[in-house]
Image (cartoon, rainbow, N blue to C red):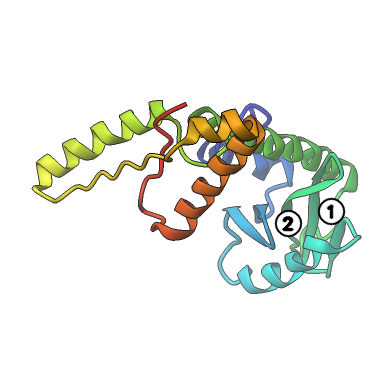
Amino acid sequence: ALANALDIQALRREALQLLPSLVDGRSFCLGRCRGDRWEWLCEPPDGASEPLAEASAMLLNATVAHVDDGQCHLRALMCGGRRLGVLGILMDNTCPVVQDGSIDAVGAVLAVSLKNMELFEDLKVSSISDRLTGCFNQAHAFSTLDAELRRAKRSSAPLSVVMLDVDDFKQVNDEHGHLHGDRLLAAVGATLRQTLRVSDVKCRYGG
């Protein structure tokens, strides 16, 4: 069930249902690596956020695979040599020792889950994106435009659509080759991403 969870909601749901029995009923948290920080999928329990956040920060770029300060046990979730997430388990007086074997097994499955989720997210993005420009593709453009037109009609709000054309693009390809044409398209896409707002939907209509 954990390995088959392909998005955040599914993994959070399965983790909250299954992990308590796998970590002997202790409080736990689960995060995934997002650049230089952890994004919590299962939040640390009340009162434990600060120490867990401090301890988990040590695992982002450290060579150690786990941190154990007597109050909480944090383990990096690794797959393919990459740190994909962190599993935190709080100790208690009744059972203060973490069973490494069982936690290793749980961690291995969770690492695969995070890797699968990452691959699925990349696949979703690539299915609606244009590789050269980094903009959305034409199919997504029409789908988004239809939704935005409906929203504008319901709310009586203004809607702007701007179309740009690269002058003499065929001539660039003919005289300088398609690789230069690709670089030109990539530069146009980069300019759009730098210039327009994040909320503006940027799509490649032609090609």
User: Dots 1 and 2: beta carbons under 8 Å?
Assistant: yes
User: How far is disc 1 from disc 2 in space, using C-alphas?
Assistant: 8 Å
- Residue ID at (50%, 46%): 189
Looking at the picture, how far across and down is residue 89, in whole percent? 73, 56
The secondary element bearing badge 1 is classed as loop
Amino acid on which the number 2 mark rests in the picture: Ile
Using the image, determine if residue 77 lies above or below residue 49.
above
Q: Earlier in the sequence, mark 1 or mark 2?
A: 2
> Which residue of the protein is positioned furthest toward the left in this rendering?
156
- Residue ID at (65%, 38%): 118
- Residue ID at (52%, 27%): 127
Residue 125 in sight: no
Judge left or right: residue 143 versus residue 189: left
Residue under numbered circle 1: 98
Looking at the picture, how far across and down is residue 4, in whole percent? 63, 26
Image quarter in which the N terminus is found: top right
Residue 26 in sight: yes
Residue 182 badge: none
Amino acid on which the number 1 mark rests in the picture: Val
Residue under numbered circle 2: 89
Looking at the picture, how far across and down is residue 147, in whole percent? 25, 35
